[in-house]
Structures are given as structure tokens and as C-alpha cells.
Image (tube, helix red, strand yellow):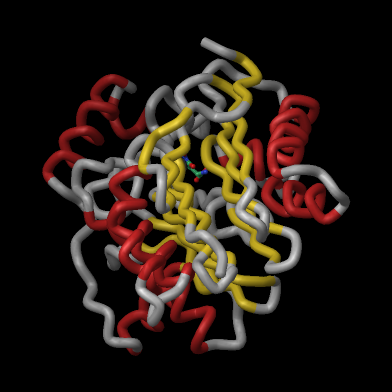
């Protein structure tokens, strides 16, 4: 028997962990159910403006969602650019369990969700529309906002990423996001990318990343973390190596952020962030708290 554990990204990860916890301790459920539930909780929360319903839209005023879920290299699923369904994580799980593919995107992913009985819904809330209008006004109107400048602003990125270990010792991971607020229409980040936003290997460990996807995609951040663990690094050493790799490979801007968590099959974990602000929500039989990452490379 393994001690069950769930780790989630950012402050809202605490509520996500609590929504997931019953699935980790119920012996008929699993770590896979738990990480899916953690994401579903955030996807349905209109106050969370970076995941699911009520998220910040792209600069064209439309929300598009990305998600992935993973148990092993042979068991993973992802969706990108979902615009009419509140729970992309569930579509990602359906892709994993009911197709021979790993990722479906856009219209095809939505048709697939419909065929599997999921209900389409409007993703824009009044608050998302108002936030978009404010951003457009501040950026000189829609025409100006369409130029291809950086889509990254302060406080516009937060993805729910969850890693869990259940009492049978099975590791699972999931992440779900609306991507970067005010992104260019069509932009997809790291979250649905297996090995970018999420990677799980049953023997070596799991990792999930959040922050500016453009800093984690080119270094295959979560695969790098798990590969380091395969080669003997502790989870903490592994996540630090990933953030250092991002620092070494990109010209950093002030609003760039990377947060990463890694979990070993034995329940040892580590976390790191490029800058302050990132938090890890931890839930186990003896803990339910929000903690600072093990290392912040550029403290505020
Ligand atoms: C993305 N990594 O689309 C996501 C956004 C995110 O914290 O994680 N924000 O780039």
C-alpha cells in the first residue's frame, strides 16, 4: 500500500486537491480519476480566469482550451483548441481511452466529444467578456491588438496541473488551461503537449509544468524532468535542472514564468519556479496546505 498524495499547481490547486481527494482514497477509484477531478473542478469555476469556463479569451475575444492526461507513454491523451466544451480534460481522457490517437484538436476534438455524449456549452462569462473589452481598450482597439506582439502579460497565466499517487502506487498526471490570456487566435501552448506540459512514466516519475509555455515547449520540460529522474536525479534536482535549462536557452522577459512539480513513484517530490508567485498545493493523509516551491530562481 502506498500513501496517497496529490500535488497541484498554484493557489487554486488547494481546492482542486480537495475535490480530487475522495477519488484518491476510494479504493474503487484511482489517481487517474483524481487528477481528472482536480482539473474538472477548476474548469467549472468561473472565478478561475485561466482554466475552463469564464477564462480570459484570446485577443479575438474567443476562449480556446487545451488539456492532457497521462499514465504512461502508451497511455496518454490530449486535446487542443477546444472552444465549445467546458471540460477538455474529460475529452483528453476519452481520447486516451477510446482512440488510437494521442491528440485531437479544434473542430475534430469537439465532434469527438459530441459523439461521446458531452454537452457543448458557452465558455465566455460576462467577466471574461468585460476583461477582454478592457484589454482591447487599453491596447488601442481590436485592430491594434491584432498585431503579433507578445501575448504575455502579468497575471494572465495559471494552469491547473495535478500529479497524484494512489494507494495502489499508480501515478497519474493531468493539466488543463485556457493558455495565455490575449494570445493570438490559434495559439496552443505546452499544456496539451506530452513531454512539454505533462509527462508521466510509471517507473521513473511524473512532472507537470505551468507558466509561459513558450519557455517549456522547446526544452520538452516535463520529459526532461522525468528523464533526469530516470538517470538518478531526485525530483527536486530534476525540476531545478529544467528551470536552469529554460534560463540557459531563452532570453527571459520580466513577465516570463515557469513553475514545475515532479513526483517519484515512491512519493518523493520537488518543485521549482523561475520567479516568485508560484505555489504548490499538497494533499496527503497528513497534509492539506499550500507551500512555496523548493527553489525560486529569481526571487521577487
Ligand atoms: C500555456 N503553460 O498555455 C500554459 C499557461 C500556463 O500558468 O500554464 N499558465 O502556455
Residue projecting furthest to the left: 126
Q: Quadrant of residue 128?
A: top left
Residue projecting furthest to the right: 231
- 153 with respect to 240 (left or right): left
Does residue 82 appear in the picture of this structure?
Answer: yes
Where residue 115 appears, as percent x and y from the top left, is: 34, 89
- 93 with respect to 228 (left or right): left
Where residue 121 appears, as percent x and y from the top left, is: 20, 67
Which residue occupies the foreground of this view, 246 or 128? 246
Q: Can you say whether 66 is above or below 247 in the image?
A: below
Which residue occupies the foreground of this view, 238 or 146? 238
Q: Can you say whether 101 is above or below 286 in the image?
A: below
Q: Can you say whether 182 is above or below 39 in the image?
A: above
Does residue 182 appear in the picture of this structure?
Answer: no
Where residue 16 appears, as percent x and y from the top left, is: 33, 51
Residue projecting furthest to the top: 300
Which residue occupies 51% across, 68% down? 167
Q: Quadrant of residue 261?
A: top right
Say which quadrant the N terminus sits in.
bottom right
Q: Can you say whether 147 is above or below 3 in the image?
A: above
- 262 with respect to 57 (left or right): right
Q: Quadrant of residue 242?
A: top right
Which residue occupies 52% across, 68% down? 78
Which residue occupies 73% across, 47% down? 225
How many badges with numbers are in the image? 0
Which residue occupies 23% across, 57% down? 44
Where residue 219 appears, as percent x and y from the top left, is: 75, 44
Amino acid at each position: 500500500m502506498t500513501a496517497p498524495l496529490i500535488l497541484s499547481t498554484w493557489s487554486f490547486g488547494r481546492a482542486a486537491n480537495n475535490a480530487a481527494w475522495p477519488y484518491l482514497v476510494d479504493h474503487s477509484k484511482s489517481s487517474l480519476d483524481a487528477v481528472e477531478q482536480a482539473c474538472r473542478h477548476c474548469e467549472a469555476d468561473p472565478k478561475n480566469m485561466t482554466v475552463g469556463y469564464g477564462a480570459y479569451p484570446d485577443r479575438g475575444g474567443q476562449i480556446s482550451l487545451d488539456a492532457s492526461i497521462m499514465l504512461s507513454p502508451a497511455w496518454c491523451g490530449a486535446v487542443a483548441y477546444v472552444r465549445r466544451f467546458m471540460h477538455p480534460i474529460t475529452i483528453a481522457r476519452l481520447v486516451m481511452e477510446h482512440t488510437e490517437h494521442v491528440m485531437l484538436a479544434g473542430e475534430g476534438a469537439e465532434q469527438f466529444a459530441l459523439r461521446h455524449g458531452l454537452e457543448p456549452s458557452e465558455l465566455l462569462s460576462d467577466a471574461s467578456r468585460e476583461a477582454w473589452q478592457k484589454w482591447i481598450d487599453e491596447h488601442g482597439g481590436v485592430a491594434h491588438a491584432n498585431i503579433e506582439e507578445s501575448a504575455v502579460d502579468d497575471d494572465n497565466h495559471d494552469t491547473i496541473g495535478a500529479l497524484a499517487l494512489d494507494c495502489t502506487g499508480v501515478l497519474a498526471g493531468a493539466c488543463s488551461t485556457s493558455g495565455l490570456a490575449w494570445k493570438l487566435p490559434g495559439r496552443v501552448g505546452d499544456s496539451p503537449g506530452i513531454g512539454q506540459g505533462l509527462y508521466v512514466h510509471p517507473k521513473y516519475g511524473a512532472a507537470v509544468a505551468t507558466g509561459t509555455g513558450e519557455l517549456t515547449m522547446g526544452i520538452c520540460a516535463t520529459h526532461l524532468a522525468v528523464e533526469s529522474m530516470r538517470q538518478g536525479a531526485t525530483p527536486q534536482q530534476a525540476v531545478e535542472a529544467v528551470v536552469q535549462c529554460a534560463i540557459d536557452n531563452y532570453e527571459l522577459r520580466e513577465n516570463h514564468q515557469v513553475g514545475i512539480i515532479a513526483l517519484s513513484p515512491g512519493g518523493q517530490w520537488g518543485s521549482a519556479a523561475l520567479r516568485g508567485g508560484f505555489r504548490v498545493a499538497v494533499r496527503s493523509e497528513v497534509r492539506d496546505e499550500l507551500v512555496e516551491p523548493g527553489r525560486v530562481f529569481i526571487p521577487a
